[in-house]
Image: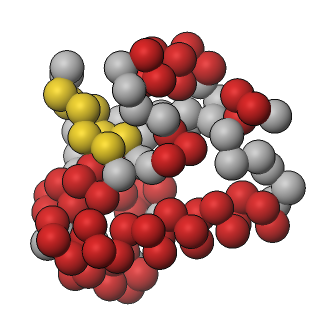
């Protein structure tokens, strides 16, 4: 899915906040906690949570069926805000299954 995202948005740089301690610290100082939602950055502009996902989906041209479904569900900001807690819960469940902490700074 990562390659699909990069293919759908050619200039997209995907960074792993779980592995990048300095990135997490910088975002946390700005008021954005990665354990509470996705972050999308464009220069100094930062979007968090459902807004980040909605903006990302509005730019995506997916060919993968799962991404196409997510794109359709989350590109509308109002719908994204309503549905995002479910997406976040699924992420938290997946991390728990992998034995990873929700917040790497509290591990």
Q: What residue lies at 37% left-to-right and 68% top-to-bottom?
A: 84
Vertical side of 45 occupied by 36: above or below: below
Residue 31 location (% of width, % of height): 38, 26
**For the point 47% across and 75% down, which residue is it?**
86
Residue 51 placement (x, y as % from top left)? 23, 53
Residue 101 seen anywhere in this rendered image of the structure: yes
Q: Position of residue 9 (x, y in %)?
A: 23, 51
Residue 74 visible somewhere in the drawing: no
Residue 89 placement: quadrant = bottom right
Residue 35 placement, left or right of 56: right
| Residue 11 at x, y percent in the picture | 23, 39
Q: Is residue 16 above or below residue 59?
A: above
Residue ID at (56%, 44%): 35
| Residue at 19% from the left image edge and 20% from the top image edge | 44
Q: Residue furthest right?
A: 99
Name the image quarter holding the C terminus: top right
Relative to residue 34, is residue 46 drawn left or right? left
Q: Is residue 35 above or below residue 60?
A: above
């Amino acid at each position: 899915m990562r390659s699909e995202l990069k293919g759908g948005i050619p200039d997209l740089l995907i960074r792993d906040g779980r592995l990048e301690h300095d990135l997490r610290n910088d975002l946390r100082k700005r008021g954005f906690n990665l354990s509470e939602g996705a972050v999308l950055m464009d220069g100094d502009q930062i979007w968090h949570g459902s807004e980040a996902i909605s903006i990302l989906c509005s730019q995506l041209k997916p060919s993968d069926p799962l991404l196409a479904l997510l794109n359709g569900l989350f590109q509308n900001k109002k719908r994204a805000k309503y549905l995002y807690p479910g997406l976040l819960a699924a992420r938290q469940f997946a991390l728990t299954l992998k034995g990873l902490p929700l917040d790497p700074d509290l591990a």
